[in-house]
Each structure stands twice: as C-alpha cells, then as structure tokens.
Amino acid sequence: MLRPFLNSSKNLTRKGGDFMKKIDFLSTLFVGIDVSSSSNVVCAIDFNSTKHLQFSVSNNHIGAEKMAETLLSFLYENKFKCVIIAY
C-alpha cells in the first residue's frame, strides 16, 4: 500500500541544491523522530512551529509502517505538499 508513495524519490536526485530551493516551506510538515532501541517518538510541526502530531511507535517493521501510514494520512488530510524528516 505504501510503495507508490515511497518510490517517488525523483526530486531527491537534483544537483546543486535545487531540491531545497523548490520547497514551499509554508506547506511543509517538519517531522522529528527520536529513535531508541525499543520505540520511536515522532513529532510533527509546521513552518510556524505549531505542533500537529506527537505519537510513539515500536522500533520494528510494524511500527515503521504505522508511522508512515499516520504521516501520509495526515499529509493528505491537511494538504501539506512536502515533508522533511529528521532523525
């Protein structure tokens, strides 16, 4: 179910920093992931530092799928155009 979304990395291969120049930061969701051996804590904010999501998932394949599904559904429901993930 997630494969069509995860295989769209064409923008990540641009040369010369063009990728960051094309981002509309006002419609970008910034996601931070605090990784530990047993769980991952996810926090998502917008450009104005408004917290939209905060949740925890287990640090395994099932947790990773739950994280991706939660983020994707939030992106589409709230019309965000881009996401930047830091871990």
Image: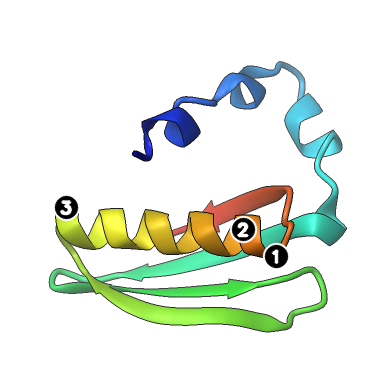
In the rendered image, the quadrant that contains the N terminus is top left
Which residue is found at the position 71% from the left and 16% from the top?
15
Q: Disc 3 designates what residue?
A: 61
Q: Nearer the viewer, mark 3 or mark 1?
A: 1
Q: Earlier in the sequence, mark 2 or mark 3?
A: 3
Q: Residues within 10 Å of mark 3 (few under 14, many from 20)?
A: few
Which residue is found at the position 54% from the left and 26% from the top?
8
Determine the CA span between mark 3 and mark 1: 26 Å
Q: How far across and down, in percent of the image, does residue 59 sit?
A: 18, 64
Q: Disc 2 designates what residue?
A: 75
Determine the CA span between mark 1 and mark 2: 5 Å
Q: Earlier in the sequence, mark 3 or mark 1?
A: 3
CB under 8 Å between discs 1 and 2: yes
In the rendered image, the quadrant that contains the C terminus is bottom left
Q: Disc 1 designates what residue?
A: 78
At label 1, the amino acid type is Asn
Q: How far across and down, in percent of the image, does residue 2 sit?
A: 38, 39
